[in-house]
Amino acid sequence: MSNVFYRSAKPYPVAVRAEGVFLWDDEGRRYLDGSSGALVANVGHGRAEVARAMAEQAGRLAFAHGSQFSSDVLEEYAGRLARFLGLPSHRLWAVSGGSEANESAIKLARQYHVERGEPGRYKVVTRVPSYHGASLGALAASGMGARRELYTPLMRQEAWPKLARPDPSLSGEADAERLRAVLEAAGPETVAAFLCEPVVGASDAALAPNPGYHARVAEICREYGVLFIADEIMCGMGRCGAPLAVWPGNSGHREDPTPDLVVLGKGLAAGYAPLAGVMASAEVYGAVMDGSGAFKHGFTYAGHPVSVAAGGAVLDILEREGLVAAARVRGAQLLTGLRDLQTRHPQVLEARGHGLLLGLVLGDPATGEAYPAPGVAERVARAAKSLGLLTYPGSGALDGVRGDHLLLGPPLSISEAEVAQLLELLDRALGDH
């Protein structure tokens, strides 16, 4: 009998090793990691230099509590990360995972307004659908019905007003203007922040608004005195072909104004260690430190030296191997292939993507709409896994129940031949369903 508390009752193969874009189980089966786990393994598996950096850091300094010490590795990494992201004045609040990072951003937005003499601001506007994490605050912020439903009695619903999903039929500017009505309805003097994923991940695979959306959102937020929080946990760190997905066209050109808070995770340490964080603007940091002098929040493992060392080694690989640019090239190849699959598999209603964050929208070819009940994405994912391809299925994008989709996000280090192999396996899986 196993003493492991599994995530579900399904059987789990035992992973024993991984290298590049592949994993192997204890029966010798090989899997092409078409989703980087949960879009985590951005630089690929089995990078010995990351393991060495972690071991060397553990030998020097494995732990120092953030209420008592900083560390050389954290100081150096925060500066490098700020430069890589094009946020030279932002400061890093480092934690262990995306849920912790979004919890931190939400609390920081609340404290920012209190320190500035506006204690009535506590609401956080988010979108439907969206996913910001599994902890209660991050889950309350999420617009993903199936994951929230069981826990709604534990949440104060009126604190989390919801904006509709991006509408591709609208210009980015017109789409963003819908935020204004939500703020007015909520009472703008009660709103602390607007939190969104620049490119949506788990809840609505690779959905993004049209260009101009984020620039207008930031202007509206500034007009109403609301902080703009960009959740780049999944779409950031080069995955969409730019250091941050919020910049227009994902080309690396910075929008003005910059988000007040940028939330990062997953690709920060690329699965080698638990690492996430919030990049906070100088204005937000200054308000807190000039006010009470401390962020009233913390986690035991925040800024853990070994995790931060992993992050530094991953950043070395991203920069040395040009993986941000590679995400654009290989992403274009993969998207072209997915659109070819769309022409041959009528249940694929749409193929879309930004860099190496891509998605297939699945539905009824007879109506061009979502199936009435979910399940096709999970079946395609099971078929793909049986063929040796790992994907990330989801459902509920439209109303919490309907709306099947398949998210794809292989490591940014994937080769041209491996993209072709991924497409061949996915073609076979779709052919079975």
Image: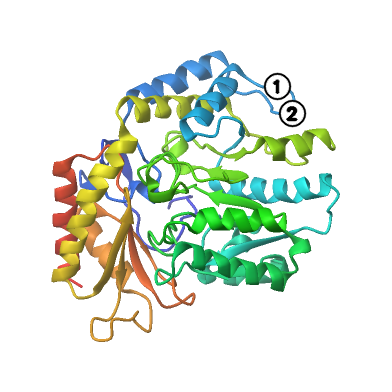
The answer to whether one can see residue 335 in this image is yes
Asked whether, in this view, residue 255 is left or right of residue 411, the answer is right
Say the numbered circle drawn on residue 238: none
The C terminus lies in quadrant? bottom left
Q: What residue is drawn where x is 54% and y is 47%?
A: 98
Q: Which residue is mark 2?
A: 67
Crowding at dot 2, Cα within 10 Å, few <14 / some 14-19 / many 20+, comes out as: few
- Amino acid type, mark 1: Phe
Q: Quadrant of residue 181?
A: bottom right
Whole-Å distance between the Cαs marked 2 and 1? 6 Å
Which percent across, then down, holds residue 140?
A: 63, 63
Q: Give 98 or 365, whichever is nearer the viewer.
A: 365
Which percent across, then down, holds residue 141?
A: 62, 61
Does dot 1 land on a helix, a strand or a loop? loop
- Amino acid type, mark 2: Ser
Asked whether, in this view, residue 161 is left or right of residue 404, the answer is right
Q: Which residue is mark 1?
A: 69
Relative to 15, does residue 188 appear above or below in the rendering?
below
Q: Residue furthest top?
A: 60
Count of numbered marks: 2
